[in-house]
Image (cartoon, coloured by chain):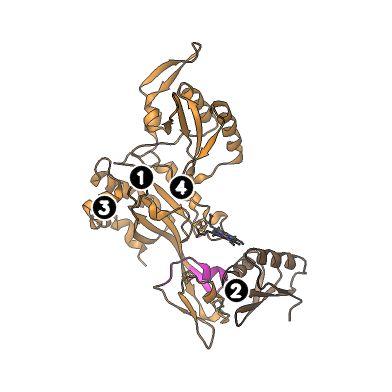
Amino acid sequence: MTDHFIEDKTTKVNVSVDGAATQKVDFNDLKSGGFIKQRQKDLFTVRLRCPGGKLTTEKLLEISKIAHKYSKKGVVHFSFRQSLEILYVDYKEFGNIVAELEKIGQKVASCGPRVRVPTACGGCEYNPNGLTDTQKMADMVDKTFFGTPTPHKFKTSFSGCPIDCARTKEMDFGFQGVVDPKWEEEACTGCTICAEACKEDAIASDPDTGKPIFDPVKCIFCGDCIRACPTEAWKPKRYGHTVRIGGKHGRHPMEAVEVCNFLPDEKVADAIKMTIDWYNANGKRGERIGNALKRVGLESYLKHMEPVFKSSKA
Amino acid sequence: MSDSTLDLRGVMCPINFVKTKLKLESMEPGEVLEVILDSGDPIQNVPKSIKEEGHKIVEVKKEGDFFRIKVQRN
Ligand code: HEM
Ligand code: SF4
Ligand code: SF4
Ligand code: SF4
């Protein structure tokens, strides 16, 4: 399940560097391992693997030194999927740079038809709006599924709340944090703050008592009411993920469709595994899962996913 | 009754919260600060942040377009 395609090095070639020491360069890495050819002759971008866009400062310091040493122009770039890219690296140095990165425990990312590095927002660890531990989930997905072969690229992301900064609607498979608010009348003082705090008009205040009148159809499960209520009359009933499938950007963007609500943390890995199984069984080579779903039908997928999704129905 | 009042009408997020926080920190634990907040963004955000800092909102009154809330310092 892990990145064996990077580790199973077979086609090693000796490259002589300035006529001095020779080193081995794995040309398989060029296709699978996050080395992207630049316009400039012999120069490549080396894309690092940074799940959730998070790095320890300690590692960042080490990466800086390596980037400074190998980038011919002394520049890095943040990829659109949160990973750091070292630009202008001579391909003859691949062996050295990979070895140095490995020494500090930094892996190189991947390209091509496989599970990509997950992206994630800050989530509940430090973001005031966060409902789910997006960083922990991204880490789990990276460890468990990164590099798993699929018919085409497979991008996942985690947003901590319905503001959806990690754009789960544009992912092959996206997870967005939600919370189910529950109101307990005894604790309510009728202050009307929750009606003000709800940006979806899902709460109106009773004109006489000031107490909330809740419209579940309008609720998007953001938890603003829970955080605003001064007396804890609004409480979290359960947390989970809204799950979306089949989105993508690119030349022909598609919006993902919602397939499950309130999927608990502990079922995320199962959901991804089962979805990859369905994709590998039904997707054509070079076909994104959204297109496969359109061709084969969403019902086939939902039926396949029933064991994972059914328990999370509202 | 409140020990102090901050009229934050017309003050934007998050400065309104920062002013509230600084004021509370200058007060003694248990003292009550009255804060006047506009409806809209301020009333949507400031009470959440006050709660997250561990202070207690003990009273909320709506007066036309603004809110008068009483906060007890933690
Ligand atoms: C206590 C103060 C504030 C906190 C804690 C806060 C927190 C946040 C957070 C966590 C986000 C999510 C976006 C991200 O991570 O990139 C966000 C988005 C945003 N914030 Fe704030 N913010 C505060 C004050 C403000 C103020 C004063 C403004 C403008 C006057 C503002 C404007 C915005 C805008 C426009 C977005 C993007 C929203 C979207 O795209 O849906 N924020 N804020
Ligand atoms: S999705 Fe929600 S939790 Fe995540 S960064 Fe945006 S506002 Fe914060
Ligand atoms: S969870 Fe969000 S949308 Fe639902 S009632 Fe509360 S504030 Fe409104
Ligand atoms: S914010 Fe809490 S106390 Fe105030 S009206 Fe809503 S539920 Fe009642």
CA gap between label 3 and label 2 equals 45 Å
Q: Which residue is mark 1?
A: A154
- Amino acid type, callout 4: Thr
Crowding near the residue tagged with mark 1, few <14, some 14–19, many ≥20 C-alpha atoms within 10 Å: many
Task: Please tell me the colour of chain A.
Answer: orange
The colour of chain B is brown
Q: Secondary structure at mark 4?
A: strand
Residue A119 numbered mark, or none: 4
Say whether marks 3 and 4 touch (CB < 8 Å): no
Task: Using the numbered discs, state the Cα–Cα distance from disc 1 to disc 3 in whole angstroms.
Answer: 14 Å
- Element under disc 2: loop
Placement of the C terminus of chain A among the 4 image quadrants = bottom left
> Image quadrant for the N terminus of chain A?
top left
The nearer-to-camera label among 1 and 2 is: 1
**Residue kind at label 2, given as amino acid type:** Pro
> Is B31 placed left or right of A305 in the picture?
right
Say which residue label 3 marks. A293
Q: Is residue A87 above or below residue A268?
A: above
Badge 3 and badge 4 both on one subunit: yes
Task: Tell me whether circle 2 and circle 4 mark residues in contact (CB < 8 Å).
Answer: no
Could you tell which of marks 1 and 4 lies nearer the N-terminus? 4
**Span highlighted in magenta in the image:** A218-236
Q: Of tags 3 and 2, which is closer to the observer?
A: 3
